[in-house]
Structures are given as C-alpha cells and as structure tokens.
Image (cartoon, rainbow, N blue to C red):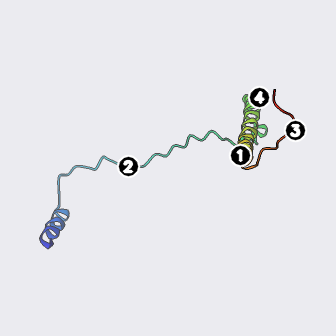
C-alpha cells in the first residue's frame, strides 16, 4: 500500500511543462428555484404597467391560501367524524 501511495504522490508532483494556458475556468454550480409564491405587497410602490395583473395574482394567491385552509379543515373534520359515533334518530327510513 505504501508503494502505491508513494507512486501516486510522485505522479502528483511530476511537473508538466507544456506552455499551455489553462483555459477552463472553475465550474460553478447553478441553482434555480421555481417557487411561484411571490410576495408582491410592494406592487403599488413602483410605477408599472403590470399593477393590474399583480392585483389579480394577489387575489389568486389569497384564494389559494383559503383553499388550502379549507382542505386542511375538511380532512381534519373527516378524520374526527369517523371516530365519533353516529347519532340515531327516531325516524325510520322509508
């Protein structure tokens, strides 16, 4: 094992003189986040032709938030209602 390490170290320290510049730059990673939840509360602070569209997008975001809350409440109620016993009424089904 020592022989392999010494040979490896010798190869790493071996000078390569070829008078060629290194044209390849460092590789940088690219990160892209496609999150569509925008905070557009400052839309009226800037003059823009997109203010009306941003108002509509804000309304859509509000509706989506209400929908998520409703879905959570529905599934919570549904799971609790299965655990509760059904109330029997005095009426008979026809």
Quadrant position of residue 15? bottom left
Cα distance in 3D space between marks 1 and 4: 45 Å
The disc label shown at residue 90, or none: 3
Whichever of callouts 1 and 2 sits on the residue coming sooner in the sequence is 2
Nearer the observer, disc 1 or disc 3?
A: 3
Residue bearing mark 1 = 82
Nearer the observer, disc 1 or disc 2?
A: 1
Is 27 left or right of 18, judged from the image as shown?
Answer: right
Residue bearing mark 2 = 27
Whichever of callouts 1 and 3 sits on the residue coming sooner in the sequence is 1
Characterize the local packing of mark 1: few (<14), some (14-19) or many (20 or more) Cα atoms within 10 angstroms.
few
Q: Looking at the image, which residue is at 87% across and 34% down?
A: 91
- Residue 67 location (% of width, % of height): 73, 38
Q: Are marks 1 and 2 in contact (CB under 8 Å)?
A: no
Q: Looking at the image, which residue is at 72% across and 43% down?
A: 78
Q: Looking at the image, which residue is at 18% across and 67% down?
A: 9
Whichever of callouts 1 and 4 sits on the residue coming sooner in the sequence is 4
Depth order, front residue of 82/42: 82
36 is higher (above) or lower (below) than 4 = above
Cα distance in 3D space between marks 2 and 3: 77 Å
Residue at the outermost bottom position: 2
Characterize the local packing of mark 3: few (<14), some (14-19) or many (20 or more) Cα atoms within 10 angstroms.
few
- Residue 58 location (% of width, % of height): 75, 36
Whichever of callouts 2 and 3 sits on the residue coming sooner in the sequence is 2
The N terminus sits in image quarter:
bottom left
């Amino acid at each position: 094992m020592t022989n392999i390490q010494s040979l490896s170290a010798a190869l790493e320290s071996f000078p390569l003189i070829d008078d060629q510049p290194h044209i390849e730059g460092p590789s940088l990673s690219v990160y892209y986040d496609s999150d569509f939840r925008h905070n557009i509360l400052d839309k009226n602070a800037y003059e823009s032709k997109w203010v009306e569209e941003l108002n509509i997008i804000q309304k859509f975001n509000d509706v989506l938030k209400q929908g998520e809350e409703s879905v959570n409440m529905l599934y919570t109620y549904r799971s609790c209602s299965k655990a509760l016993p059904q109330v029997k009424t005095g009426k008979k089904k026809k």
